[in-house]
Image (tube, rainbow, N blue to C red):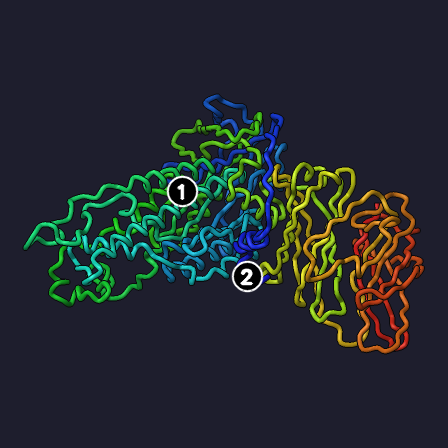
């Protein structure tokens, strides 16, 4: 699988589609899933400002009145978050002070701020994207506070909607994803088509001979592109319903040309002049073009879905980006030469044209469409990307002071919408809060995009927002030490509670491997039904052929009918091929066998892990996690590569190092057999746990080739309770 170029990963979705290509999928009739109604705590984020737009920081629980479905509810939980400005000439250690009732400790806010950087490549320009990236990076450094979560989405005509980074509190990851955005994604700027269209409509230019019908056709194509763009954003808004809390979407775009959606007053160009001899093109055009009903309805629906998903849009118009201030900047904006038509202010035509020219009309820009999008979702429009630092600081202030109100609800799995309203008793206050919330719905009713967001949330987030998945344990193992290409096998233990979650219908097991730059390096997907393994733990292996380097690995196991999931992750380092000497590979620890099942993923290019780690699975099972109480002895399967040595003799020893205290414990080591397997020497060792105190320990296993003096070691983690 090829590596991605940039950010972590809109290509995860492409890789998933590719991995499923050519597979025959059996669609089975699904029985309706039943969910019990449960009582849970609903948390609402509320922003309060005075009439001047300044945050109001000193309200108490008694100042709020909250309605759910038109009925008042009792506020049982309350948090106040106040953005404290830094002292003069000093950088604050924490930029936010939190006061809270004892039920909600201030150290762990119930709802953190959530920001979405959205880069629109379809309606933009290269300098605007550059300025947008600079603005986003500035906000990451100066606006985002510890605990805030940031996501990065983008849209282009060629790639569609991309989730470059899902909600993460790791600013370094988000920064890397922003820096990796490529201006080459800009394509098909509809604004140019719209501008040429209205130039013809007003008679300011004439179509080139033989191409009279091209512009109207291209304009219809632009409308179709605009519709696709709006539909994708609407689907995204629906997918964000189930991300808790208020979302602040920071949009970098020039916007859809207003005239595409709302029409205009110049009319549609006619190919033949229409009015007969002596009639100008402008005179023959109809006096008014009505709004496009389909685009208008789609755009209004987008506003409603964003509002319902508690997503306020802060639009940063990048249209000002290409304008470089010069002595003649105003004249160029009014009279500027358009595609060599010769109508600049140094020509007769340019001097004589009216002040109502195409270049003065905001209707041909996305100003109104962006401003309306922000206003109708509770955000704000900013008109000059060159002033983004100051404007983003205003966003930081507006979103920095907020309240969290909590109350119990009966939660049914029906996807129904509940309208809520928040009022403040103090006079002179404006309240901005979510308009409502959706009950959860069965996973089978999720749209394709919602399922993709659900998977990316599990794959990329340390604390997924869609659900609290079960946790498995993953360890990296070697798979082919004698090969020139370093190979890796990931062995994951899914405990019994995780298997029970995944039981009932088919599940997908997806392994993601990211390199040091956080780019997706490998993805493997397997389907299996785990229902028959409900009474046992499951060991799942998946391999990859990787170059030397450090990697972050993650397994997502997800039931395709219920959406229940389990995740596991591990970091590993793949060394360069050995030229001479000995090398120990990661050991596999074993304990006396209990009930276990083994599944193997796609490892055709790597080989089975059991070839390098042979053991009797009737007597032993892998130890991933703490050993059972009373376990006195464990085994270790230790592969060793030997290169460039004609004769060798190996001696092994081991040590446990307490991870907290550094205390060293030397166990009794008993060699139990040595075999040659897959180009390596594999040693079985018995290790005594007698005298090993409770706690987390690092097991060091050393090997010495006594004839040449070559040394090597490998490690494994062990928790003793």
Q: Choose the circle earlier in sequence order: 1 or 2.
A: 2
- Secondary structure beneath dot 2 equals loop
How crowded pointer 2 is (Cα within 10 Å; few <14, some 14-19, many 20+) is rated as some
| Identity of the residue drawn at 65% across and 43% down | 507
Residue 301 vertical placement versus 627 (above, below): above
Q: Nearer the viewer, residue 502 or 368?
A: 502
Q: Residue 4 shows which numbered tag?
A: 2
In this view, the residue in front, 405 or 259, is 259
Single out the residue that lies furthest toward the top.
71
* The label number, if any, that marks residue 654 in the structure image: none
Q: Residue 179 vs residue 257: left or right?
A: right
Total count of labels: 2
Q: Position of residue 715 (x, y in %)?
A: 80, 60
Quadrant of the image containing the N terminus: bottom right
Location of residue 333 (image quadrant): bottom left
Residue nearest the observer in this picture, 346 or 77:
346
Residue linked to disc 1: 379
Question: How much space separates mark 1 and mark 2, taking CA atoms?
Answer: 34 Å
């Amino acid at each position: 699988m090829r590596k991605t170029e940039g950010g972590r990963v809109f290509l995860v979705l492409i890789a998933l589609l590719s991995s499923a290509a050519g597979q025959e999928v059996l669609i089975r009739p699904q029985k309706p899933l039943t969910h019990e109604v449960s009582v849970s705590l609903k948390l609402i984020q509320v922003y309060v400002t005075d009439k001047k737009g300044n945050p109001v920081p000193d309200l108490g629980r008694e100042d709020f009145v909250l309605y759910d479905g038109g009925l008042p509810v009792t506020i049982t939980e309350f948090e106040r978050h106040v953005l404290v400005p830094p002292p003069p000439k000093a950088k604050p250690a924490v930029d936010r002070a939190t006061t809270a009732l004892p039920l909600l400790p201030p150290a762990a806010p119930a709802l953190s701020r959530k920001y979405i950087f959205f880069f629109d490549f379809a309606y933009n320009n290269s300098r605007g994207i550059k300025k947008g990236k600079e603005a986003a990076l500035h906000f990451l450094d100066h606006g985002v506070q510890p605990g805030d979560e940031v996501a990065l989405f983008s849209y282009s005509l060629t790639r569609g909607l991309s989730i470059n980074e899902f909600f993460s509190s790791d600013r370094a990851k988000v920064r890397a994803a922003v820096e990796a955005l490529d201006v080459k994604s800009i394509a098909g700027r509809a604004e140019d088509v719209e501008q040429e269209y209205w130039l013809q409509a007003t008679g300011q230019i004439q179509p080139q001979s033989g191409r009279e019908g091209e512009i109207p056709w291209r304009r219809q194509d632009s409308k179709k592109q605009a519709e696709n763009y709006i539909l994708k954003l609407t689907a995204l808004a629906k997918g964000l319903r189930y991300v808790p809390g208020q979302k602040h979407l920071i949009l970098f775009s020039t916007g859809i040309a207003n005239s595409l959606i709302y029409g205009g007053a110049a009319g549609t160009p006619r190919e033949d002049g229409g009015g007969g001899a002596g009639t100008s093109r402008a005179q023959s055009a109809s006096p008014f073009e009505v709004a496009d009903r389909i685009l208008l309805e789609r755009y209004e629906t987008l506003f409603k879905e964003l509002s319902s998903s508690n997503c306020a849009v802060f639009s940063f118009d990048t249209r000002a980006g290409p304008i470089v201030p010069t002595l003649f900047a105003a004249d160029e904006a009014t009279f500027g030469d358009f595609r060599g038509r010769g109508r600049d202010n140094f020509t007769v035509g340019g001097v004589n044209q009216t002040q109502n020219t195409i270049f003065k009309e905001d209707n041909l820009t996305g100003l109104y469409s962006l401003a309306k999008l922000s206003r109708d979702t509770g955000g704000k429009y900013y008109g000059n990307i060159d002033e983004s630092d100051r404007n983003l600081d205003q966003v930081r202030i507006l979103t920095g002071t907020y309240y969290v109100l909590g109350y119990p609800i009966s939660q049914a799995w029906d996807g129904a919408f509940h309208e809520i309203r928040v009022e403040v008793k103090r006079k002179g206050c404006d309240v901005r809060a979510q308009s409502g919330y959706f009950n959860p719905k069965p996973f089978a009713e999720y749209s394709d995009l919602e399922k993709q967001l659900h998977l990316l949330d599990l794959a990329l987030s340390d604390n997924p927002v869609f659900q609290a998945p079960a946790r498995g344990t993953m360890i990296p193992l070697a798979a082919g030490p004698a090969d020139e290409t370093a190979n890796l096998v990931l062995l994951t233990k899914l405990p019994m509670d995780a298997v029970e979650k995944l039981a009932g219908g088919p599940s997908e097991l997806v392994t993601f491997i990211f390199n040091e730059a956080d780019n997706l390096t490998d993805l493997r997907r397997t389907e299996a039904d785990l229902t028959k393994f409900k009474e046992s733990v499951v060991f799942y292996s998946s391999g990859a052929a990787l170059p030397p380097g450090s990697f972050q690995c993650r397994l997502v196991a997800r039931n395709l009918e219920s959406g229940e999931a389990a995740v596991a992750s591990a970091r590993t380092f793949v060394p360069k091929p050995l030229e001479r000497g000995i090398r120990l590979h990661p050991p596999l620890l074993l304990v006396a066998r209990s009930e276990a099942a083994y599944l193997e993923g796609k490892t055709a290019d790597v080989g089975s892990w059991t070839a390098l780690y042979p053991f009797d699975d009737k007597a032993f099972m892998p130890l991933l996690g703490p050993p059972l109480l009373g376990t006195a002895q464990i085994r270790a399967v230790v592969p060793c590569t030997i290169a460039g040595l004609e004769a060798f003799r190996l001696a092994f020893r081991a040590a446990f190092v307490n991870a907290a205290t550094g205390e060293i414990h030397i166990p009794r080591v008993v060699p139990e057999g040595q075999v040659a397997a897959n180009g390596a020497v594999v040693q079985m060792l018995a290790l005594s746990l007698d005298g090993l105190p409770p706690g987390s320990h690092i097991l060091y296993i050393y090997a010495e080739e006594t004839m040449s003096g070559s040394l090597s070691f490998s490690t494994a983690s062990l928790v003793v309770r």
